[in-house]
């Protein structure tokens, strides 16, 4: 494993350079790890990086705010960009290479190809953000092609994204192994997100309703509640007055199809809600994940 003090952290901007670098280290026998991000790195990203660092000989982190996955009315321009701080964090974490292409480098004029995953992309984020997943799968497919055979790490905060990418890799026979990581939360329970930086203290207080709502449903589920609408409503009641809800969905944790009237042994409960201009997502898999706010409670080893 590389040590931050001994091994340089390459800053790579040109796609061809990344490709050549990964090929070279693979020839030398290294397992290549990959953590794709949009930067403004926080402890959630860091957990993925640390996990990848432990498991791979050569580790690449990409930092690219992908315009293709933002809708016209979304926050592409407000999205935080903190390249120097991100590179410093990567160095500190022992990352071997940081890949930060420009938009021009990733999308030279004249590109005509999109990668699209069907069905899994239809509910939840796909419905709320038309075109979002086509942007995600297209950029991740391009990044995977540059990386070559690798171990890629994704957070379950973006649960649907993790499922969609896993499906794309299987369907297209990509030489990539996808690993997932549990959600990392701040001490107040809010899932870490680059967008949290845009919340003022009062808004941050309101954002706490999101993990609290998930926790309320988790507790009801543990007490035996299986009625989908009751679980959804409990969540909605807790969010009311604090956030504007985009959706609260109960779905099958594997195929993401909406839960029937009564949920079985486990169900994904996913929330998207706005605190004023800031859109946040969060989730818990009922019957599988620990309590969102008290992880020591229930379903040990589920992560
Ligand atoms: P992003 O920079 O938001 O595109 O996220 C890059 C990766 O980090 C994705 O796989 C996310 O799911 C993951 N990630 C972001 N925030 C968290 C978090 N709080 N806990 C776990 N993974 C996260």
Image (cartoon, rainbow, N blue to C red):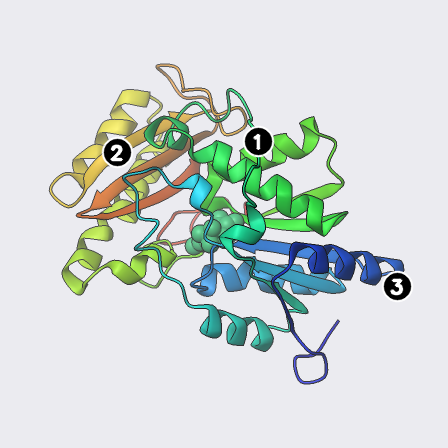
Q: Quadrant of residue 58?
A: bottom right
Q: Alpha-carbon neighbours of circle 1 within 10 Å: few (<14), some, or many (≥20)? A: few
Q: Which residue is farthest front?
A: 110
**Mark 2 in CB contact with mark 1 (< 8 angstroms):** no
- The residue labelled by disc 2 is 246
Across and down, in percent, residue 283 comes to: 39, 41
Instruction: Name the spot of residue 43 as percent of width and height, x first.
Output: 46, 65
In the image, farthest residue toward the bottom? 5
* Mark 1 vs 3: CB contact within 8 A: no
Say if residue 6 shows up in the picture: yes
Using the image, determine if residue 193 lies above or below residue 229.
below
- Is 43 on the left or on the right of 209, as rendered? right
Mark 2 vs mark 3, CA separation in Å? 48 Å
Image position of 35 (left or right of 272): right
> Pointer 1: what residue?
112
Which residue is pictured at 23% across the width and 52% down the height? 207
Name the foreground residue: 157 vs 265. Answer: 157
In the picture, residue 15 is in which quadrant?
bottom right
């Amino acid at each position: 494993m590389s040590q931050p003090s001994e091994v340089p952290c390459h800053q790579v901007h040109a796609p061809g350079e990344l490709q050549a670098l990964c090929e070279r280290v693979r020839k030398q026998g290294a397992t290549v790890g990959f953590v794709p991000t949009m930067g403004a790195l926080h402890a959630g990203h860091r957990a993925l990086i640390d996990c990848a660092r432990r498991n791979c000989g050569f580790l690449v982190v990409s930092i690219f705010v992908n315009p293709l996955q933002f809708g016209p009315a979304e926050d592409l321009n407000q999205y935080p960009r903190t390249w120097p701080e991100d590179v410093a964090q990567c160095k500190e974490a022992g990352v071997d290479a940081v890949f930060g292409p420009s938009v021009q480098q990733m999308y030279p004029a004249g590109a005509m190809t999109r990668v699209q995953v069907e069905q899994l992309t239809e509910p939840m984020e796909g419905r709320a953000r038309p075109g979002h997943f086509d942007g995600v799968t297209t950029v991740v497919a391009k990044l995977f092609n540059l990386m070559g055979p690798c171990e890629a790490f994704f957070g379950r905060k973006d649960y649907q994204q993790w499922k969609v990418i896993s499906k794309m890799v299987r369907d297209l026979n990509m030489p990539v192994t996808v690993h997932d990581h549990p959600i990392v939360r701040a001490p107040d329970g809010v899932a870490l997100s680059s967008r949290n930086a845009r919340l003022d203290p009062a808004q941050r207080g309101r954002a706490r309703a999101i993990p609290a709502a998930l926790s309320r449903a988790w507790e009801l589920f543990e007490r035996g509640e299986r009625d989908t609408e009751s679980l959804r409503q409990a969540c909605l009641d807790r969010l009311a007055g604090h956030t504007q809800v985009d959706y609260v969905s109960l779905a099958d944790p594997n195929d993401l199809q909406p839960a029937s009237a009564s949920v079985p042994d486990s169900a994904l409960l996913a929330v998207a809600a706005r605190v004023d201009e800031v859109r946040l997502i969060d989730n818990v898999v009922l019957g599988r994940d620990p309590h969102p706010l008290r992880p020591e409670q229930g379903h040990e080893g589920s992560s």
